[in-house]
Amino acid sequence: MSGSAQTASAVAVTRPYRFSWRDIFGRQEFGVFLILLVMGLFLSLYTDTFLTSTNIFNILRAFSWIAISAFGQCMVIITGGIDLSVGSVMGLSGLASAMLLERQVPVVIAVLGGLLTGLIVGFLNGLMITKGRLPPFIATLGSLLMARGLCYGLTGGWPVRGLPQSFRNLGQYDIPIAGLNVPLPLIFMLIFAVITAIFLTRTVWGYRIYALGGNETATALSGINTARVKLMVYSLCSFLTAIGGVLMTARLGVAAPTAAQGYELDVIAAAVVGGTSLMGGEGTILGVLIGAAIMQVLRNGLVLVGVSAYWLQAVQGLVIVVAIMLDQLRKRGRRG
């Protein structure tokens, strides 16, 4: 670390913290949270069913696996990359667990098999990017097609049914807390949110992830093995996505080769809407969590107001474009 950086660090440590409302209202997460509140207010006034406990908990359950995958996507985007394969990895991981269960394998082993499947895909993505020198877009696009092709090839296009109840409980069970039946996937999602947030903000590897996205050349010159960081990030992204895929499959009770098709849009949108910059170097798990909630409320709201599901992808695309435009305007404002 340079002398100026050490001095700045020492000043930051010794300077007393002064509370400022700008610390709260100036954060990207606050603006995203306001959007979520406005959406919730509109839907609660426009429909009679949005604020029912059943609908709210269905939203929380359904966005859990999207959020878990988006935590990994956030780390990838912070490094300046992108992972387009998350939807297919989610489907393939859930299918791998289901096929193991079909062969009477214990639930724990089947779940581990699904998670290992996702980890392998992520590791291969990292190798193609670091060793093969492929752009992340191309490498993960190829993985998207290969993983989805495996889903169809392994099943012949037929879904895997008859999953045991002990496995389905992972996605369907509700835990009674304070008189409310809290979905188990929501608990998993909150746990991984805390773990990932601590990893990004309180560990050396988290610092390296942000540094890589901020300036890859300077990071490499400082002695950090950037290839190793990328390999780790893509592996973690697919591993977290596999967790989401297993939970999704457990919730549905069936593993279809078409499962999670197009979910890469939801995952990327959750990260981008939550303030993760596609230019790299910026992003928080809290923002991703709020972004995932926005995308699920949007999906749920379109159904409640009677908009055809065929319009969903058009709306998702519009949301992504607007989020990127706002990010660019925010960056120009800082430079100005």
Image: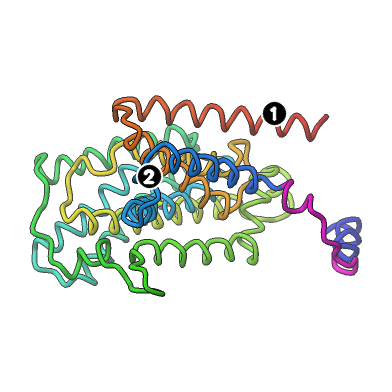
Magenta segment includes 239: no
Q: How is the image coloured?
A: rainbow
Residue 321: x %, y % from top left: 53, 27
The local crowd at label 1, few if under 14, some if 14 to 19, many if 20 or more residues have their Cα within 10 Å, is few
The residue located at (28%, 66%) in the rendering is: 112
Residue 126: x %, y % from top left: 45, 48
Which amino acid does the dot numbered 2 rest on? Val
Circle on res. 45: none
Q: Secondary structure at mark 2?
A: helix
- Above/below status of 271 relative to 194: above
Q: Dot 1 corresponds to which residue?
A: 329
Q: What residue span does the magenta drawing correspond to?
A: 13-26
Image quarter for residue 217? top right
Q: Quadrant of the N terminus?
A: bottom right
Q: Nearer the viewer, residue 94 or 139?
A: 94
> In this view of the protein, can residue 326 be seen by the observer?
yes
Mark 2 or mark 1, whichever is nearer to me? 1
Q: Dot 2 corresponds to which residue?
A: 86
Image quarter for residue 169? bottom left
The residue located at (27%, 66%) in the rendering is: 170
- Above/below status of 255 relative to 204: above
Return the disc, 2 or 1, that comes first in the chain's sequence.
Answer: 2
Q: Secondary structure at mark 1?
A: helix
Say left or right for 76 vs 301.
Answer: right
> In this view of the protein, can residue 130 be seen by the observer?
no
Image quarter for residue 325? top right
Which amino acid does the dot numbered 1 rest on? Leu
Magenta segment includes 23: yes
